[in-house]
Image (cartoon, helix red, strand yellow):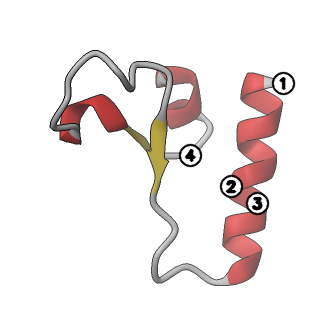
Amino acid sequence: MSALLQAGVRVYPVEEHAIQKGRHLDKVIIGYGNLPEEDIVEGVLRMKRVLG
């Protein structure tokens, strides 16, 4: 996740918020509230570049 952060994309592990621990290790929360659509698109493109 540090590579995403360096690319300017913040994600949050679902596991930190899960009631049943150990079941969501491969999932993240993507915060996109209060962002214009073009910023969301840019964030998804950055994620694709980093994770692609």
Tell me: 22 left or right of 47: left
In the rendered image of this protein, does residue 34 appear above or below residue 17? below
Q: Dot 3: few (<14), some (14–19), or many (≥20) neighbours within 10 Å?
A: few
| Chain-order first, disc 4 or disc 3 | 4
- The kind of residue tagged 4 is Gly
Task: Measure the C-alpha gap from mark 4 to mark 1.
Answer: 16 Å
Is 25 on the left-hand or right-hand side of 39? left
Helix, strand, or loop for circle 3? helix
Q: Quadrant of residue 39?
A: bottom right
Given this view, does label 4 or label 1 mark the residue nearer the observer? 1
Crowd rating for badge 4 (residues with CA inside 10 Å; few <14, some 14–19, many 20+): few
Q: Are the residues at dot 4 and dot 2 in contact (C-beta closer than 8 Å)?
A: yes
Q: x, y percentage for residue 6?
A: 54, 32
Q: Could you tell me which residue is drawn at 55 percent across and 79 percent down?
A: 35
Dot label at residue 8: 4
Q: Nearer the viewer, residue 35 or 15?
A: 15
Read off the residue under disc 1: 52
Spatial separation of the CA atoms under disc 4 and disc 3: 10 Å
In the rendered image, the quadrant that contains the C terminus is: top right
Q: As shown in the figure, which amino acid type bears the numbered disc 2?
A: Gly
| Rendered residue at 46%/37% (across/down) | 28
In space, the residues marked 4 and 2 are separated at their CA atoms by 8 Å
Q: Amino acid at mark 3?
A: Glu
Q: Amino acid at mark 1?
A: Gly
Q: Residue at x 73, y 27 (%)?
A: 50
Residue 31, x across and y down, in percent: 45, 60
Query: Label 3 near label 2: C-beta < 8 Å?
Result: yes
Q: Residue furthest left?
A: 19
| Earlier sequence position, callout 4 versus callout 2 | 4
